[in-house]
Amino acid sequence: MASLASPPRLERFASVLAGEGVDAFLCSSDVTMGYLHGFHEHGYERLLVLAIHRDGRTRMVCPALSESHALRAGISDVRTWHDGEDPMACVQTLAADWNLRTGIIAVDDDMRAATLLELQKALPAALFRPGQSLLGRLMRVKDEGEIELLRKAGAIADKALAAAKKAIAPGVTELEVEAALNTEMLRLGGKPTFCIVATGRNSAEPHHATSDTRIKDGDVVLLDYGCSLEGYQSDITRVVNCGTPDPEAERVYGIVLASHHAARRAIREGVTCETIDRAARQVIADSGYGDHFIHRLGHGIGLRGHEEPFMVEGNLHPLEVGNCFSVEPGIYLPGRFGIRIENIVAATRDGHDSMNEEPADRLVPV
């Protein structure tokens, strides 16, 4: 995986820690460590953490088997432990060297509960606090290189749609369509990360688990899928119809499409995240389907499929140039069908750029 990590990221993050009165940040996620220092490895049940001091110093505490990887990533201060040893001895040394025994220590959201509990036991006088929102100040604003990778990952998802359309036919299972999508994303250079294929009444379940349900003539077929490219994610939702669509499905598709575009028209620097959600929700409410739009409008995306900022009521964060997120309104009629339309966009000063091609202007039969 290519790394876009750079010393300025660590310097900027250290400034955030200092500004918030945090003495150190401990992270164990391969995503977080990769973003900050180009180290893409997960310790799983073994203790593996990257520590960042408010003055910019870094130290890796890791199993001995990960030492060479850490050194290749440019981490000069690496403290190792072997299987059978107590890794908390390295943590105690870190606490003594950095004066953290009574310090304020932030951790990332992905840290295992067992790891955090062991850290709290080793440093009972330290104050541990959530640190993901601090890191989010950096990660939610993408630079040009990151946006280009998101755009390329989005293009792979766009192109893979043709394979799904070709696979859809009466009698074909959701799993068979999923296989066609994943095979095509792989062929195009992406690493498939998730895929929802939901036909007929299954499409009314926003997070349906793709199954062996067979597609029937007349079914709405919802496709929500994505891949990663050098760690950066795509996420797209398209809806087609197997054969001639039901008139209400056509009408609902038009409402969701209008909602999707209303939200995108509201995007610009300085507008709050909840404003974008409200713009989409108002269109669906005015149509009489308000009770059937049952989730937030969207989520941030980057090295994680879901990250800050979130387009949801109550989020007063003002959009910044470089915020990348999904716009995915939906209407779900239980027992019948569901429609969701999703593009990934990047906020600009006066609007946005889409990482995906435009959705169809009608419910397309295949």
Image (cartoon, rainbow, N blue to C red):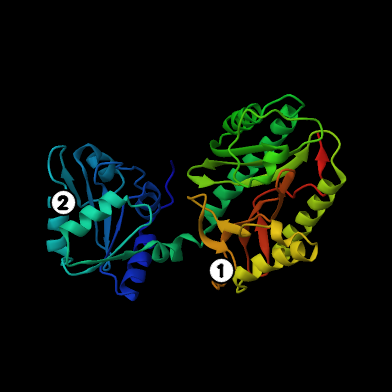
Say what amino acid the circle numbered 2 marks.
Met
Which label sits on residue 88? 2
Q: Where is residue 272 in the image (x, y as percent from the top left)?
A: 60, 72
Element type at marker 2?
A: helix
Between 18 and 225, the residue placed more toward the observer is 225
| Residue drawn 17% across the image and 63% down it | 124
Count neighbours of disc 2 (C-alpha within 10 A) and say few if under 14, some if 14 to 19, many if 20 or more: some
Report which quarter residue 268 is drawn in. Answer: bottom right
Name the side, left or right, on which 23 lies relative to 260.
Answer: left
Residue 73 higher or lower than 59, as above or below: above
Q: Position of residue 48 (x, y in %)?
A: 26, 47
Count neighbours of disc 1 (C-alpha within 10 A) and say few if under 14, some if 14 to 19, many if 20 or more: many
Q: Quadrant of the N terminus?
A: top left
Say what amino acid the circle numbered 1 marks.
Glu
| Residue drawn 83% across the image and 33% down it | 243
Q: In which quarter of the image is the C terminus?
A: top right
Residue 184 higher or lower than 278, as above or below: above
Q: Which of marks 2 and 1 is nearer the N terminus?
A: 2
Residue 191 higher or lower than 5, as above or below: above
Instruction: Mark yes or no: residue 123 visible.
Output: yes
Between 167 and 170, the residue placed more toward the observer is 170
Q: Residue furthest top?
A: 171
Distance (Cα) linking label 2 and label 1: 40 Å
| Residue drawn 57% across the image and 49% down it | 150
Comparing marks 2 and 1, which lies closer to the viewer? 2
Q: Where is residue 82 in the image (x, y as percent from the top left)?
A: 15, 39
Report which quarter residue 72 is drawn in. Answer: top left
Mark 1 sits on what residue? 320
